[in-house]
Image (tube, rainbow, N blue to C red):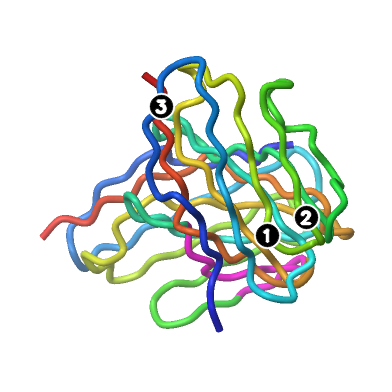
Amino acid sequence: QQPVQSPQAVILREGEDAVINCSSSKALYSVHWYRQKHGEAPVFLMILLKGGEQKGHDKISASFNEKKQQSSLYLTASQLSYSGTYFCGTGNWAGNQFYFGTGTSLTVIP
Amino acid sequence: EAGVTQFPSHSVIEKGQTVTLRCDPISGHDNLYWYRRVMGKEIKFLLHFVKESKQDESGMPNNRFLAERTGGTYSTLKVQPAELEDSGVYFCASTDGNLYGYTFGSGTRLTVV
């Protein structure tokens, strides 16, 4: 049930791009993306519901593939503030189940 | 709008003691979840309330953990007696429905020594 994320960790220099993947063996009803900074609460980034959907704001965007088994988070021209652990999460249609992915630690260095 | 509030922010207790964590969700959010993150690992689901009812408690580790949600408002999570492996950060989250993201509290960092 728990989605698998890759890579587990990534280090970037400011201005570089990154892609974080979230995969499931079963079709997902929805996929959420969150970012958690050390010692803080996970912060909601976006939710995707439809196969083939793409959405984003500023330089952070995400896609959900047609089969709804994979989502990718795209970070372009990374900034120091992007550092943190990124989690995807998936819920069911009833909203009574929600599981986080395995997490990706992203560090942006000057 | 006030966010999700958790109390205390930190707790250090000895093995065998009891600790109660509290979560105040966003007003009007029927869905309330408890999660735990241990040693920087993934965030594990503990349980889900819809109003005052436990919808899913499949993630609760064992019967030393007891969650309640009085009147469908705030929720408490009691650990009794605490063991060393219970250490971690306990997060509470609430949502208005399955089409929206979850709002998380800042968490309670529990350390059992």
Residue occupying image coordinates x 45% and y 27%: B87
> Disc 2 sits on a residue from what chain?
B
User: Looking at the picture, how far across and down is residue A16, in whole percent?
Assistant: 25, 63
User: Looking at the picture, how far across and down is residue A75, in whole percent?
Assistant: 39, 66
Callout 3 crowding tier (Cα within 10 Å): few <14, some 14–19, many ≥20: some
- Disc 3 marks a residue whose amino acid type is Ile
Residue occupying image coordinates x 35% and y 55%: A37
User: Looking at the picture, how far across and down is residue A13, in whole percent?
Assistant: 18, 57
- The span from disc 3 to disc 2 (Cα, nearest Å) is 25 Å
Work out whether residue B66 or residue B47 is closer to the camera in this orientation and state it: B66
Do residues under tags 2 and 1 come within 8 Å of each other at their CB atoms? Answer: yes
In magenta stretch: residue A47? yes
Q: Quadrant of residue A109?
A: bottom left
How many numbered callouts? 3
State left or right for residue B7 relative to residue A90: left
Outermost residue to the left: A110
Q: Earlier in the sequence, mark 3 or mark 2?
A: 3
Q: Secondary structure at mark 3?
A: strand
- Disc 1 marks a residue whose amino acid type is Tyr
Residue under label 2: B70
In magenta, the rendered stretch is: A42-54
> Disc 3 sits on a residue from what chain?
B
Residue under label 1: B74
Q: Earlier in the sequence, mark 3 or mark 1?
A: 3
State left or right for residue A3 relative to residue A8: right
- Disc 2 marks a residue whose amino acid type is Thr
- The span from disc 3 to disc 1 (Cα, nearest Å) is 23 Å
Residue under label 3: B13
B43 is higher (above) or lower (below) than B9: above
Callout 1 crowding tier (Cα within 10 Å): few <14, some 14–19, many ≥20: many
